[in-house]
Image (cartoon, grey):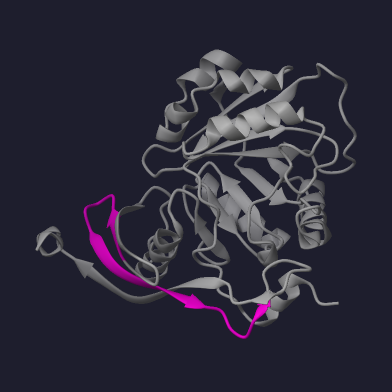
Amino acid sequence: MSTCSTASRELDEPLAGTAATARTWLLLEQPGPWGAKALTSSHLDPALGRALETAAKGTGVRIALIRRTGRHADRPAGAARRVYAAHTVPGRVWLRTATTADPGQLLDLDFAALGRGEHDTFDTALGGQPHDGDPLALVCTNGKRDRCCALLGRPLAAELAASGVDGVWEVTHLGGHRFSPTVLVLPYGYAYGRAEAHAVKEVLHGVQEGRIVVEGCRGSSAWERPGQAAELAVRAAEGVYGADALSVVHTQGTAPRWEVTVAHADGRRWWVEVRQGASSPPRPESCGSVLGSPARMDVTAIREVTVTSLAC
């Protein structure tokens, strides 16, 4: 039986504009098995999971569980867990880390402030500090959500870890199972699909240099889907690869057409037309689902503009 990722790859479904949306990511280490909805179907207290979901709702914060590669044995009660928080909006990007023996401490966080890019409560509640290690490579391996994530994600995570890449974690649902293996790279928040180990290493090397690799990129989680596609299109067309160089400053319209303004830190701006199309022929959006036509973000026009022309 063909998997959803096989069908997507064979049909050459575009990757751009398919990343999960989150201005800020909050990652909690949770060893052991994960269910389809991991916050409430893992060995994390489900009442705590529900409370965290409620606290994060509408704040721009997305919570995910992470675990090291390899065997997923639970740790003893009270063992220290790693926690990360990352803000992904260009010009204000940061990645903080802490440890806690009590994941309930996460409820002391000001989620609205985290979503705005303020990490004060992360530091005070958890003893957070700047992450001074290598970039994080978060590989989705949540097989209970979709089998492709386990079949393709776990071998990728293991290969990266075995080859000495630091910062590799398995992570719960990143969206877009059919693009497995999927990887989120922090601190900048760019997601990649159909990832291979050599390509992930190049992406991580680029991040260390403050550079974004466009090939295989699904988009930045800082933007909604039309903005993701527009920003990547400008990068590719103009050869702009600086991680903090581009921002989506305005999006106008609704499906199926948007006008997106992408701004460079040096003052240049581009007008980008993005249209929503339907992927054809029909294909499964996840393994076991009925055939459908997933929405795709197609960039149909790009032009550099002046600030004066934008105001007219």
**Viewer-proximal residue among 102 and 40:** 40
Tell me residue 198's x, y (percent). 69, 61
Vertical placement of residue 191 versus 281, above or below: above
- How many numbered circles does the render carry? 0
Q: Does the rendering let one see residue 127?
A: no
Left or right, 291 with respect to 268, comes to right
Outermost residue on the bottom side: it is 281
**Viewer-proximal residue among 160 and 108:** 108
Segment tinted magenta in the rendering: 259-283
> Residue sitting at 47 percent across and 53 percent down?
211
Tell me residue 161's x, y (percent). 78, 46
What is the magenta segment's predominant secondary structure? strand
Tell me, yes or no, whether the highlighted magenta stretch contains residue 100: no
> Residue sitting at 74 percent across and 37 percent down?
40
Vertical placement of residue 137 versus 297, above or below: above
Vertical placement of residue 43 versus 297, above or below: above
**Viewer-proximal residue among 150 and 49:** 49
Q: Does the rendering let one see residue 130?
A: yes
Tell me, yes or no, whether the highlighted magenta stretch contains residue 273: yes
